[in-house]
C-alpha cells in the first residue's frame, strides 16, 4: 500500500473514531438529561404526594381578632353573650372573605375531589375570648380566631350543632316509567347517608302511618307546603322529598344496563322555605335483569344524598354568616298599622332585610332576615317599646314567629 493510500486510510480511521466518540458523548449527555428529567419528575411527584398526605399547616390558616356586641335584654346576660360571640365570629370570617370553591375534602374516609360549596366564606376554629363584659347595657366580646376554609368536614358537624341539631325526615317515591314502585331503596340510602354524618332522623315508616295519601302525592309532586306540613306534624325541622325514576334495562353482551335519576329537595318545615335542590343521574349494570334497576337507584341515591348534604350545610353556613330567614305572621293589622309594624321591625338590632309576602286584613305575612335565631328575635321584640302599638308573641319555631298586634 503506497503512502497516499495509507494516509487516506489513517484519515478515515481517525474520522470514524472521532464520530464514535462524539456519538457516545451525545448519548451520554442524552442519558444524563433524561435522568435529570426523571429525578425532577420524581421530586415533583414526591412533593405533590407529601402535600396531599401531610395535614394543612398553620400557614394555610389565617388568625384574626374580631369583636361583637349585643344588647342585654331583661337581664339575660348569657343570651347577649351568645349573640355577641356569634357576631364576632361573623366578623372574623368577613375579614378573611375566602370563597370555598372546588375544594378537596375528606368525607367518610374517602377522598372526594372538587367538592363545590359555592359562596361559603370560611369556617372559624380555635376561638379564644380575649375580652368580654358589659358595656352600656350591652355585652361586648373580643375574640382571637383561626379561619381555615379547608376543614370542611369537621365544621359541617359544628354547623349542625350550632343549628340546634334539626331533625330530618326523608320521603322519596320510586317509579319505573309510569308505574309507581313499592321499593324504599332510595329513601333508605339517603337516610343512611345522613345518619352516617350524625343527623337526627325521623322514622319515616312510622310517620307514613299518619300521612294521608293525597298529602303524600302532593309532596311527591314537589309541593313544598304539603311536604312541610307532613314534616312538621312528624316532628322534623327539615324534610327531604324527592323522586327516583328508573329506565327499562337494556341488554348488551349478556349484561343488563339501567339508568336512574334521583331528584331531592330539602325544605324547612316551619315556613316551607327551600334549603336545597339536586338531581343526580347514575347508570348500573348487572348480570340479572331485575338487579340492574335497583342498582342504578342505589347509586344515584348515594350521589344525590352526598350533594344535598353539602348544599344543606352551605345553606346553614350562609344563615350563620349573614342571618337566618324567619317568617313573621302578624294578626290584628290593617294597612296603616302594618306599615308602622314593618318600619319598627326594620329598625330592630340584627334585622338586615324585611319583605312583605302577603296581606289580607287582619293578617299579614313577612319575610325577615335576622342575625341570630328566632328565640333571640323574640326576646328583642318582647323588650322593645313601640310607638302607637304593642306586639305580643303568640307562637315561635326556629324559622317562624307569630305576633299579635295590639
Image (spheres, rainbow, N blue to C red):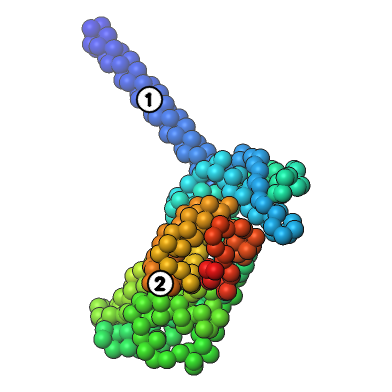
**Tag nearer the camera, 1 or 2:** 2
Does dot 1 land on a helix, a strand or a loop? helix
> At x 33% / y 76%, what residue is drawn?
260
Residue 153 position within the rendered picture, expressed as x and y whole percent measured from the top left: 57, 59
Q: Which mark is residue 26?
A: 1
Q: Is residue 343 left or right of residue 89?
A: left
Front-most of residues 186 and 47 = 186
User: Tag 1: Cα neighbours inside 10 Å, few (<14), some, or many (≥20)?
Assistant: few
Residue 381 at x, y percent in the picture: 60, 61
Label annotation for residue 361: 2
Quadrant of the image occupied by residue 203: bottom right
Outermost residue toward the top in this view:
3
Mark 1 and mark 2: Cα distance apart in space: 94 Å
Residue 369, image x and y in percent?
49, 58
Name the outermost residue toward the bottom: 209
Which residue in the rendered view is the most extreme toward the front?
A: 388
Asked if the residue at tag 2 contacts the one at tag 1, i.e. Cβ–Cβ closer than 8 Å, the answer is no
Q: Residue at x 39, y 91 (%)?
A: 213
Amino acid at each position: 500500500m503506497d503512502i497516499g493510500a495509507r494516509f487516506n486510510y489513517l484519515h478515515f480511521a481517525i474520522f470514524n473514531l472521532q464520530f464514535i466518540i462524539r456519538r457516545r458523548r451525545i448519548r451520554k449527555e442524552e442519558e444524563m438529561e433524561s435522568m435529570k428529567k426523571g429525578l425532577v419528575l420524581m421530586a415533583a411527584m414526591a412533593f405533590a404526594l407529601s402535600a396531599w398526605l401531610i395535614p394543612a399547616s398553620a400557614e394555610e390558616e389565617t388568625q384574626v381578632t374580631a369583636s361583637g356586641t349585643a344588647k342585654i335584654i331583661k337581664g339575660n346576660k348569657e343570651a347577649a353573650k351568645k349573640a355577641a360571640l356569634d357576631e364576632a365570629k361573623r366578623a372574623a370570617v368577613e375579614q378573611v372573605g375566602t370563597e370555598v370553591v372546588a375544594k378537596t375534602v375528606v368525607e367518610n374516609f374517602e377522598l372526594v375531589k372538587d367538592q363545590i360549596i359555592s359562596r361559603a366564606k370560611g369556617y372559624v376554629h380555635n376561638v379564644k375570648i380575649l375580652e368580654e363584659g358589659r358595656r352600656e347595657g350591652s355585652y361586648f366580646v373580643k375574640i382571637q380566631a383561626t379561619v381555615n376554609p379547608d376543614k370542611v368536614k369537621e365544621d359541617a358537624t359544628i354547623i349542625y350543632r350550632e343549628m340546634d341539631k334539626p331533625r330530618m325526615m326523608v320521603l322519596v317515591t320510586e317509579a319505573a316509567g309510569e308505574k309507581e314502585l313499592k321499593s324504599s331503596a332510595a329513601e333508605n340510602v339517603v337516610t343512611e347517608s345522613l345518619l352516617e354524618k350524625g343527623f337526627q332522623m325521623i322514622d319515616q315508616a312510622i310517620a307514613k302511618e299518619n300521612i294521608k295519601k293525597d298529602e303524600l302525592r302532593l309532596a311527591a309532586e314537589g309541593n313544598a307546603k304539603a311536604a312541610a306540613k307532613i314534616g312538621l306534624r312528624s316532628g322534623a325541622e327539615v324534610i327531604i322529598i324527592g323522586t327516583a325514576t328508573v329506565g327499562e334495562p337494556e341488554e348488551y353482551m349478556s349484561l343488563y344496563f339501567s339508568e336512574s335519576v334521583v331528584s331531592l329537595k330539602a325544605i324547612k318545615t316551619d315556613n316551607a322555605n327551600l334549603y336545597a335542590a339536586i338531581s343526580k343521574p347514575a347508570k348500573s349494570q348487572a348480570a340479572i335483569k331485575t338487579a340492574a334497576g335497583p342498582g342504578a337507584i342505589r347509586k344515584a341515591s348515594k350521589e344525590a344524598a352526598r350533594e344535598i348534604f353539602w348544599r344543606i350545610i352551605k345553606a346553614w353556613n350562609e344563615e350563620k354568616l349573614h342571618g337566618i330567614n324567619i317568617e313573621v305572621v302578624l294578626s290584628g293589622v290593617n294597612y296603616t298599622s302594618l306599615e308602622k309594624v314593618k318600619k319598627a321591625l326594620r329598625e330592630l338590632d340584627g334585622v338586615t332585610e324585611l319583605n312583605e309576602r302577603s296581606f289580607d286584613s287582619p293578617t299579614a305575612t313577612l319575610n325577615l332576615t335576622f342575625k341570630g335565631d328566632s328565640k333571640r328575635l323574640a326576646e328583642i321584640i318582647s323588650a322593645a317599646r313601640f310607638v302607637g302599638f304593642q306586639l305580643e308573641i303568640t307562637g315561635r319555631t326556629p324559622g317562624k314567629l307569630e305576633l299579635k298586634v295590639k
